[in-house]
Image: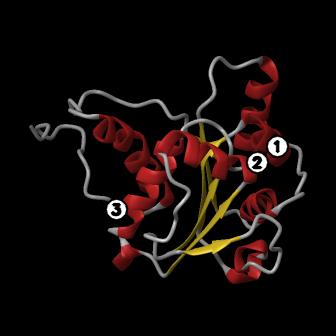
Amino acid sequence: MKIVVAITGSSGSIYAKTLLDTLTTLSAQTKAVGVVLSDNARINWELELGTPDFSPYPFLFYEKNDFFAPFASGSARYDAMIVCPCSMGVLARIATGISNDLITRAADVMLKERRKLILVTRDTPLNLIHINNMKTVTEAGGIICPASPSFYSKPSDITSVVRTVTDRVLDLAGLHPDTYRWGESPTP
């Protein structure tokens, strides 16, 4: 599977970090992982996580205006794109077809090629514009997956709580993380 991960400037860098951490363990399931960050994503990553260092990740990182990135075209046949976290501004640009950077261009490609586009929205509360933009993206074939953790697995720390979201997102993308499944006994 070839996958794109876009990280935007919404608060919630821990979701993006946990998603990338888990993706490093799924290398047998991925053929390529491309990552693109907005300027505000870099700022929030450092603010929320304390470091702007992405060198531990074995993925290809692309600049936000690199329209030569393979996933800027449908002919590269990327299977899925995850925007995590997805700001309301990026959601709005995707919903209205404004492809002004690599993130929104790649999302547009996913929708036009009928491939998986998963937006991990984090903002709350929502106004009617946000809700209508989510409706538009959903009607176009995208998946809105709010960063709303679940607790039936009895997560014991912040990473476990975050993984209830990111593992679900990876499931939606078509990957198979080692995670709690409904009906199983939670791990102590």
| Distance CA(mark 2)–CA(mark 3) | 25 Å
Secondary structure at badge 1 equals: helix
1 and 3 marks in contact (CB < 8 Å):
no
Q: Which mark is residue 95?
A: 1
Q: Nearer the viewer, residue 44 or 155?
A: 44
Up the image or down, 15 lies above or below 37; here it is above
Q: Which mark is residue 140?
A: 2
Amino acid type, mark 3: His
Between disc 1 and disc 3, whose residue precedes? Answer: 1
On-image quarter of the C terminus: top left
Mark 3 surroundings within 10 Å by alpha-carbon count, few (fewer than 14), some (14 through 19), many (20 or more): few
**Residue 89 appears in which quarter of the rendering?**
top right
Report the mark closest to the observer, 2 or 3.
3
Residue 111 x %, y %: 75, 58
Q: Which mark is residue 176?
A: 3
The residue positioned 59% from the left and 64% from the top of the image is 80
Between disc 2 and disc 1, whose residue precedes? Answer: 1
Up the image or down, 124 lies above or below 181; here it is above
The residue positioned 89% from the left and 44% from the top of the image is 96
Amino acid type, mark 2: Ala
| Distance CA(mark 1)–CA(mark 3) | 28 Å
Residue 173 as seen in the image, left or right of residue 60: left
Residue 8 x %, y %: 67, 48
Residue 82 x %, y %: 59, 55
Residue 140 x %, y %: 76, 48
Amino acid type, mark 1: Ala
2 and 3 marks in contact (CB < 8 Å):
no
Between disc 2 and disc 3, whose residue precedes? Answer: 2
Secondary structure at badge 3 equals: loop
Secondary structure at badge 2 equals: loop
